[in-house]
Amino acid sequence: MIGTIEEAAAVEQLGRMMLGAMERGRALHLATARRLRREARAAAVWRGHTLGRFSPLLPSTGRGGYSEATCTACGAWLRIETAPAPNSIDVSGEAVAVSCTGRAS
C-alpha cells in the first residue's frame, strides 16, 4: 500500500518511465525490421528471386520480432529477426542463400 503523496507520485513516474521505455523499444524494433526487410529483399533480388509481401512483424520467443517472405516464382523463403539470439543471424533463409530456379520445388 502506498502511504504518502510522494510515494504515489514516485510510483506514477516510474510507470510513465516504463511505458516510455516500452514505446522506444517497439519503435526501435520497427525501424530495425524496415532496414532488415530492405537488406533481405536486395539480397534475394540479387539471387534472382521475386519476393511476395513480408508477413507482419510477429513477436518471437526472445526479445524482438520476426517477419517472413517467400519467392513467388520458386517458393524459397527468408526470415528477418530484429533481435536474434546470440547464436543466430538477423537475415536467413533459402532466398538469400541460393539462386532462384523459377519453379517451385
Image (cartoon, rainbow, N blue to C red):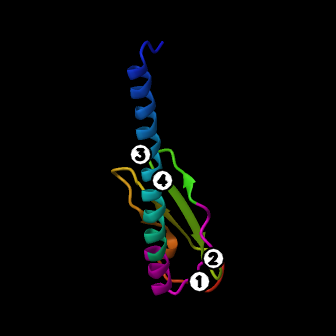
Instruction: Give the residue displayed 57% in from the left and 84% down from the top.
Output: 101
Image marks 2 and 1: residues in contact by CB distance under 8 Å: yes
Label 1 to label 4: alpha-carbon separation: 29 Å
Q: Is residue 97 visible?
A: no
Which mark, residue 50?
1
Badge 1 or badge 3: first in the primary sequence = 3
Instruction: Give the residue displayed 43% in from the left and 52% down from the top.
Output: 24
Image marks 3 and 2: residues in contact by CB distance under 8 Å: no
SS at circle 3: helix
Badge 1 or badge 4: first in the primary sequence = 4
Badge 4 or badge 2: first in the primary sequence = 4
Which mark, residue 21?
3
Q: Which residue is nearer to you in this view: 31 or 1?
A: 1
> Over which residues does the magenta segment extend?
39-56
Instruction: Give the residue displayed 47% in from the left and 50% down from the top.
Output: 23
Quadrant assignment for the C terminus? bottom right
Label 3 to label 4: alpha-carbon separation: 9 Å
Mark 3, residues whose alpha carbon is within 10 Å: few (<14), some, or many (≥20)?
Answer: few
Q: Which amino acid does label 2 sit on?
A: Gly
Which-is-in-front pick, marks 3 and 4?
3
Q: Name the residue under label 2.
A: 52
Q: Name the residue under label 4.
A: 26
SS at circle 1: loop
